[in-house]
Image: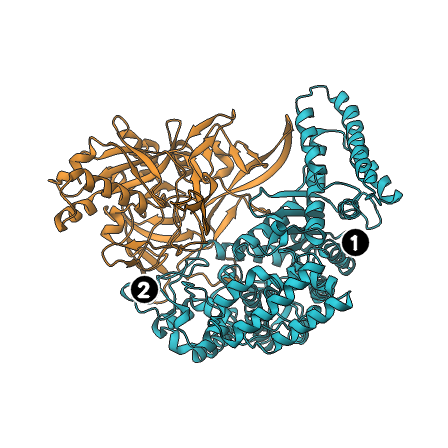
Amino acid sequence: MNFDKYLFNFSIGPVQPFIAAARRTRDLWFGSQLLSELSFIAAKTISETGGELIFPHPNVLEFADKSEINVANIILAEIPKEGKTPQQMVEKTENAVKEKWKECAKKVFEKYQEIIDQEIWDSQINDALEFFAAWVPIYNNDYKAARDRLNEIFAARKNSRDFNQPSLNANERYLEKSPLDGRNETILDTNSGKSFDPEKLPEEIQRQLRLKKNEFLDAIGMIKRGSEIKQFPSVDRVAIDPWIRHIAKNSNSTKKLEEIKKICEKLPQVIKVKSQAYKTFPFEGSILYLNRHKSIKEELSFKKDSIEEKKLEEIAKILEKLYKVTYRPSSYFAMIKADGDKMGNTISKITTKEGLKNFSSALSDFALVAPQIVTEKGGACIYAGGDDVFAFLPLDTCLSCARKLREEFKKKMSKIKKDSTLSVGISIGHFLEPMDSLIHFANQAEKMAKEGEKKEDERNGLAITVQTRGNAPIGVREQWKDEKDAESLDNRIMSWRNAFKNNSLPFNFPYSLHILEEYYLNWSNETLVNKALPADLLRLFKRSTKSNTQKGENTMSNNDKEKITKILENTYSVDCLKKLTNEILIARHIERTLSFPTPRDGGDQ
Amino acid sequence: MTKSPKTIKITPRDPLVARDGRPFSEGKRMKSLDWIRPSVVIGSLRTLVGKLNQKGFNKNTIKELKDISITGPFPYVNNKLYFPTPLDMVLKEEGTQNSEGEKSTYTSIHQLKPGKYNEGEGSTLPRYLSPAMLYPKEQFKPLKRPAFCSKNQMTQWLLTKDIKTSELNKLLQYNKKDGSFFNNNNVINFPKKEERIHLKICPESGSAEEGKLFSSIGLDMNIHDNNGDILPLEMLAKLDTDIPQNELFKIISKLNHIHPCGGERRLVKWNICNNLEKIWECPKEIQEAIKREKKLRMVLATPAIFENGWLPGWLTIKEEHETKCIGTIPGTEIEVQLVSVVNERWQPLSGWSYERNKPKPISRMVPAGSVYFFKITNSVSDEDIANMWLQSVCDDTQLKKDGFGLSLWGIW
């Protein structure tokens, strides 16, 4: 059979060392930017060599530079039979990407060559990227058939991973490994494997690289850390945002914050954050946590009695005063991982090139708007490409951000499929948790959002998990309901938060529910449980609110009271109760860390 | 080889920490791999034997110790030996059923095997490799494989040419809640990971020292079976030596000791087992099938390290346009042509070198469970087949002795 064009798939990897292997937020963010930039070069090369882009949509090439959109690492294009062969297209694209990669590497190498072992650097740079490509002819404009076959061949290509042993002789590699993934030796010149002490580095390098003692970076890690990039907000800046907004409401405390800002301006070591969301206080958040000052001093190598140390002490004094007039800042923040549901299924039904292009256009529209939503909500977007979003959000806006992302996804995808849904996992964690654990929690929350108890309950989910330090993780999940529906999970959490906020409910309320759980666990008569449990819950709720009313603290609105009564009436089994307890515990955690933190929750000791 | 290899049963007393090569210090989390590397187990055993010898570790002793070779360790549960699930086995979710409140998913098995490009199709695979494609052809998102399958199940799989007609494709039951598989105990998962927080106690006050905190993750060596019972997940390994007069090897025949293995000096029992020699033999059906068929399949039962990365050193790329890759299987006279490969991304192996007192360099390993498809180009003898089963296909002699690259064989 004759054909005149190919469908062509090209991918760049490995994703893991580029993105997940990160200690600092900027490593994570820059890694994903870097991979996106390389994917952009690949897409551009394919387009300029006669290919017609399908994924990403060609318009991504126009606005990728100006926006926060990410180019996914898998590129789908149509290439004409006349012209470059698929093999030549692969070669050209690979070369362009490698060239860009080497250019990035060279910049970092030139800047830090005095601390880099060049031999091992070169070998890792040459080994770093992997490419996969596959192609099939398109017969009779049947794009569905071509895509199905291409998927088979591309999957087969990825089933066989060809790799070499590290190119540098083993004798030269008796060195420490990168602590992030343990897959490469360090490129830092450590004098043959002895421990590496960043304190011995020139001050400028120490400040830029923020190396911890024995943080043995490999080449990719070094490029992520050492590249000249705009400063990405770290997790502490995201976590402290509600506190800063709270401070900014009061003119007296605002003055104090301004004083701190002025001192920070004079401390070049303190990282300035360039994000629209953080204009009020455009510096790293750790400076506002008293309990972080000791490690700031260590990380920035402030000498004893130096001007820098004195300035930090000045900040500490102001903070002490601020902490007295307001609550202490919370150390918790939220990560959102969102993913379109059944995208593979949707795309597999598309039969024409225009259909595929419309699909990729809708996805890029969403990816373009997602970072804006995140920024509006005071967050920082790590990745937004296709139907995937990964972002860090302050605790008080994470739920509304998830809702907004979901609504926007529905809207943008409605051209393609009316009932398109987005599953969103929110995981709340402490900013001092290692980044790999935080990413792991976020992935788990996303997985939880997708899964359901029954087949019909799968996907279209919202999951919220809380991972506190020292406690077992808790989580709750259900399918999205309409925004106005008071029974939707996000609205319910809001009701519980209000109840705690108004002091209508004591903070130990969910623990009383635990006792009920144990009590009803052994009841064998389900009908009895169905009747007794809601009644018992209402009794407990009335008693708890009553005690606070007597103390004159209860200001719960009738509306909230009604909503909560309805929730309790619908809790008819021990399983429902378990879910409810988790839901209240999550609301409690959010409210407690935002408005009523003890030193243990968010304090400085 | 000696004529009397020994079988040893390894029973962990504590959760095992299988270190992953990352540096570790105060305030960090010590991670554990999913399963322990053979080199860790044989290294620990050699130390134990050296200590029992009570003559110190001189050059000759070290040479004799390093000569002790290991086959394994493989999971051993309820008198059944388990091997890593081959990567050419692909599981598909077939539907769910609720029984007594537990949600179970039923799965069917598909296989990956060498396929062909049609006219105009292609990929960046080396030219001598055929694409490993899914059979029967279907589009679905594969389920995560169970980590290990029993020797019987593995034997059946290695004899499977066409999954459609195979006995194996009776539906497997899969418990989605904790992701474990049940099928008459023919498959097991990796041990669960258990996290422990450690702290430093101040000797004066008896309380925890400020900030001296770290956590470790260990493998909980217990298996929960279908009935909810807990069974110990033990390990079985075969030991052997090439030196006929290896005095140290004699110590092994009386081994019944407790000695640490892996990270954090977690304790395990080392017991010699008699009457289990047959477990290491190649099943008769497989021997017969290989003799009959010209299509040979190699499954790695432990990770392998080859000089050329993913490609064994005993295979050479031939002909002008690199269209053929041929070689002779180590320890045999069987000549083969490589047709296709199913593997995963490389895994790193490092460790600590006591000889240099430095971290060992990274080697890239082909993961356990990887599958190589061959065509046999000459005739095969019974002896050859018997010699192949569970022998190492690595290129380096010491790596062979350290238990890497053990191979299982079948047809396709």
In front of the other: B104 or A244: A244
Secondary structure found at label 1 = loop
The amino acid type, in three-letter code, at marker 2 is Gly
Which of the chains bears the disc numbered 1?
A: A
Mark earlier in primary sequence (2, 1): 2
Secondary structure found at label 2 = loop
- Specify the quadrant of the image occupied by residue B237: top left
Q: What is the letter of the orange chain?
A: B
For this view, does B211 lie left or right of residue B272? Answer: right
Q: Position of residue B194 (x, y in %)?
A: 47, 40
For this view, does A23 lie left or right of residue A484? Answer: left
Give the residue displayed 46% in from the left and 54% down from the top: B27
Q: Position of residue A414 (x, y in %)?
A: 78, 57
Residue A193's label in the rendered image is 2
Identify the residue under disc 1: A418
Q: Is residue A153 visible?
A: yes
> Does label 1 lie on the same chain as label 2?
yes
Q: Is residue B25 above or below residue A48?
A: above
Q: How many marks?
A: 2
Give the number of the mark in front: 2 or 1. Answer: 2
Q: Is residue A258 above or below residue A591?
A: below
Give the residue displayed 34% in from the left and 68% down from the top: A190
What is the crowding at mark 2: few (fewer than 14 residues within 10 Å), some, or many (at least 20)?
A: some
Q: Position of residue A263 (x, y in %)?
A: 62, 75
Which of the chains bears the disc numbered 2?
A: A
Colour of chain A as rendered: cyan
Q: Is residue A148 above or below residue A269?
A: above
The amino acid type, in three-letter code, at marker 1 is Lys
Taking the view exactly as shown, the residue that stands out farthest to the left is B245
